[in-house]
Amino acid sequence: MTDTPLKILTYNIHKGFSVGNRRFILHDIKDALRKIDADIVFLQEIQGEHLMRKQTINNWPDSGQFEFLADQIWHHHAYGKNAIYKQGHHGNAILSKYPFIEWENINVSAMRSASRSLLHGTIQIPGSDQKIHVICVHLGLFDVEREKQLSVLSQRINSHVPREEPLIIAGDFNDWMGRAEKHMNMDLDLYEVFKSTTGRHARSFPAWMPALTMDRIYCRGLKPVHCQRLHKMPWRKLSDHTPLLASFSLG
């Protein structure tokens, strides 16, 4: 593998609105993401289309939010449409500077209005002959729901991700009690990057006073170099979640 470092970010963008849906701040999120300049961005709660908001909000983008955010930085993207309703749809997305070999969205929503999915992509890093699997997740609010979704995740990984191929799973796990660890550590041999580098999970929700450990980055087959929670300005005034930023050595 190449020695080029890989920088990834995961972020629940709350459909481009501030806390309580008081302000549409997608343009501010775009500016903040561009300054971070991650190689791969895992996004949850991203609006693919909303007909009413497109008519009533002046600076609503003409394209889907994932295309608007990707713009000229991330030339490759995948979007999983999970929550579908009369005015539009939302789901999860992965933005990448590197091309996808393939990608697939596995909708694990228990309710039609909830965006719960496993968006699985395979990416080829230039200068490397080995594939990297990336899975963007957004799990349910209830234990029973998450257990079923984690079981689907385990099955997906065991059937589609060879042990010798690196894997990153990132997103909003809604797992403030830490019960996903059994599946990720024992069943799949994954470790959480923030916890492995700091000794604890990152408190990422709510953004203005983070108390719950909702957002995670798990990996195997890669060496983490650094992981941090972006909880200062401007992030604390954007979505209701704070992003996690990690870098990996591909050497």
Image (tube, rainbow, N blue to C red):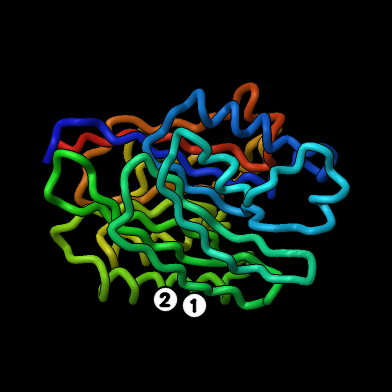
Q: Secondary structure at mark 1?
A: helix
Tag 2–tag 1 contact (CB < 8 Å)? yes
Percent coordinates x, y for residue 175 in the rendering: 54, 57
Marks counted in the figure total 2
Picture coordinates of residue 53 (x, y %)?
82, 51
**190 lies left or right of 233:** left
Residue identifier under label 1:
148
Q: Secondary structure at mark 2?
A: helix
Answer few, some or many: residues within 10 Å of disc 1's Cα (few below 14, many 20 plus, some between 14 and 19).
some
Location of residue 92 (image quadrant): bottom right
Residue in the picture at 57% in, 40% down: 69
Question: Which quadrant would the C terminus be assigned to in this image?
Answer: top left
Disc 2 residue type (three-letter): Val
At 16% from the left and 63% from the top, the residue drawn is 163
**Residue 76, x across and y down, in percent:** 41, 47
Amino acid carrying mark 1 in the image: Lys
Distance between the alpha carbons at the discs numbered 2 and 1: 6 Å
Q: Which mark is residue 152?
A: 2
The residue sitting at 57% across, 76% down in the picture is 144
Judged left or right of residue 157, residue 235 is right
